[in-house]
Every structure is written in structure tokens, then in C-alpha cells.
Amino acid sequence: MKCKLFLLTCILTASVSFAQLNILTSFYPVYIMALNVAGGVPGVKVESLTLPSTGCLHDYSLTPMDMVKIERSSVFIINGLGMEQFLDRVIRRYPRTPVLTLSEKTDPIIKNGRVNPHIWLSIPLAKIEVRNLADGLSHLDPSHASLYRRNANQYIHKLDVLEEEMARELAFLKGESIMTFHEAFSYFAKAFSLREAGVILREHGAIPTPKDLAVLVAMVRREKVRALFVEPQYPQGAAELITRQTGVGVAVLDPAVTGSLSKDAYIDIMRQNMMTIKRVLGSNR
């Protein structure tokens, strides 16, 4: 219901004229998409609510300065699927601020009744988000619709090339078992036919108990997992305990929630993830 409401809000405000369109994005991956779709369009400013070093928003609390940014924005662009848990507060306080949800028309992974919001780590779903972004901005700011759609098409072409390259380079690892830090890489694994044997953290912020660690150690051995993939934004203590007991190495995969402000940052991160997986899993086969 909320997503439909957000989309309807954008359509209803499509006739509004802006001296300057102030686009506010919720966090890093959404910001990079907005830079590619709206960057360089006359009279359009793209800003992120959170710093590029913030990471995922699971535990994020809005600050007074954040509320000022939202109040001054022409549209607030979010990933959705529960990633922005503070959103209800925003809607209550600023009911007239259009909210554009990029996860519309995607098919998220649902496990144990919980929706996995990290859809940008699937390139096909990231492309849907980019298309939704262009469509939403075109409704909101029709005078620049052709520019938004042109920019989106150009970026989607880059993502097409990236997807083809990664599928080709990782094809020989089809069915390989991996264990990741948390659920973010479920989409990555699905997109490239890797088998997700398990995750170190079942819930964000949870600390694995000794029983949890014993289960993970047994899983690593049973599934013949050859590497644990951690994330640069989080501590690696639990992974190090597992590797001490199993001898399995630890490597870093980046969930693209922090990084540079380059328009190609997402592409660069995903390509680096591809190279890491090839190097780690491609050896000793």
C-alpha cells in the first residue's frame, strides 16, 4: 500500500513547476543511481540524506539536520522494502513531500517471512530501480523527462555490459557454495547461480552465540565452503572464529553501501566483487 501511495503522490505533483528540483536520496546506492539519471540535468540538484560512509540504514536514526534536508527537498527517493525504517516518521511529518520508491515492480527475496531489501546487488533488479527512478522523475518534472530517460538508458546500457561480463567470468563457478556475512549477498548469489550455504549473521546487529558458531562451522564443512565472505563495513570477529576452526579463508565482498561519489562507483564495486570471487574460488579447483 505504501509503495502505491508514494507513486501516486509523484503523479499528482507532476504538474508542479520547480525553480530548482532538489532531489534527496536516502543512502549511498540510491544516490549513485540518482547521479546517473539526474546528474547534469539543468536546474536539478542531487543530494544524499546520509553520508556516503553511513552504510545500510537498518539502525539509522534521523537527526534534526536530516529533517531540515527532507523539508527542503522536492522529492525523497528511497530503496524501499523496509530499508528506510524511519520512513513512517517522515511521512507523518511531511505528508506533502513526494516519496519515490525504487523497489516498485521488483521481485524481492522473502525468507522466513522477512523481505530482503538489498535488491541493488542484483544487476537485473538494479536496472529496474534505475528505470523506476527515471519514470518517477519524468512524472514529477516532465519538462526534463527526455533527459532523465536518456540518462537512464545510457546507465542501463553500462549495467547490461557489466552483467554480461560478470555472467561470463563467473559461469565456471555455477553451483559453488559460498557463506557470506549477512543477507545482502543473497541477490548476488542468485543472479550468478552461486549457492548460498549460509550467512554468518541471521539478523542485522545480532551477535552469533557459541551454538550459532558451532552450526556455522558444521555447515562450512558439510557444504565444502572454501571461503567466508565478509563486508568492509562490519567487524570480522565471527568470521575469524569460524576460519580458525575450519581453516577456510576470509575474503571481502563490498555490498555497495559506501564508497566514492563517482557515477561509476557501483559498477567499479561490482566488478571488484567479481574479481575477488574469481580469485578466491577459482583457485585450487
Image (tube, rainbow, N blue to C red):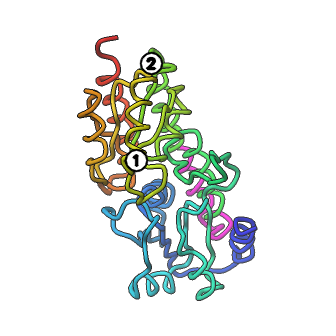
SS assignment at label 1: loop
Amino acid type of the residue tagged 1 in the rendering: Pro
What is the number of the mark on residue 21? none
Say above or below: 27 vs 37: below
- Residues at badges 2 and 1 in contact (C-beta under 8 Å)? no
**Which callout, 2 or 1, points at the residue further toward the start of the chain?**
2
Say above or below: 193 vs 234: above
Q: Confirm whether the magenta stretch covers residue 169.
A: no
Q: Confirm whether the magenta stretch covers residue 145.
A: yes
Total count of labels: 2
Q: Residue 258: x and y, percent?
A: 34, 56
Q: Nearer the viewer, residue 143 or 24?
A: 24
Q: Nearer the viewer, residue 57 or 4?
A: 57
Q: Read off the magenta span.
A: 138-153
Few, some or many C-alpha atoms within 10 Å of disc 1 (few <14, some 14-19, many ≥20)?
A: many
Amino acid type of the residue tagged 2 in the rendering: Leu
Per the image, the residue denoted by label 1 is 255
Location of residue 57 by image quarter: bottom left
Q: Residue 274: x and y, percent?
A: 37, 30
> Residue placed at 61% from the left, 59% from the top?
81
Q: Residue 132: x and y, percent?
A: 63, 55
The quadrant of the picture occupied by the C terminus is top left
Q: Residue 153: x and y, percent?
A: 56, 45
Q: Is residue 83 left or right of residue 219?
A: right
> Residue placed at 37% from the left, 56% from the top?
207
Q: Nearer the viewer, residue 215 or 151?
A: 215
Per the image, the residue denoted by label 2 is 173
Q: Main secondary structure of the magenta part?
A: helix
The Cα–Cα distance between marks 2 and 1, rounded to whole angstroms, is: 20 Å
> Residue placed at 57% from the left, 82% from the top?
89
Few, some or many C-alpha atoms within 10 Å of disc 2 (few <14, some 14-19, many ≥20)?
A: some
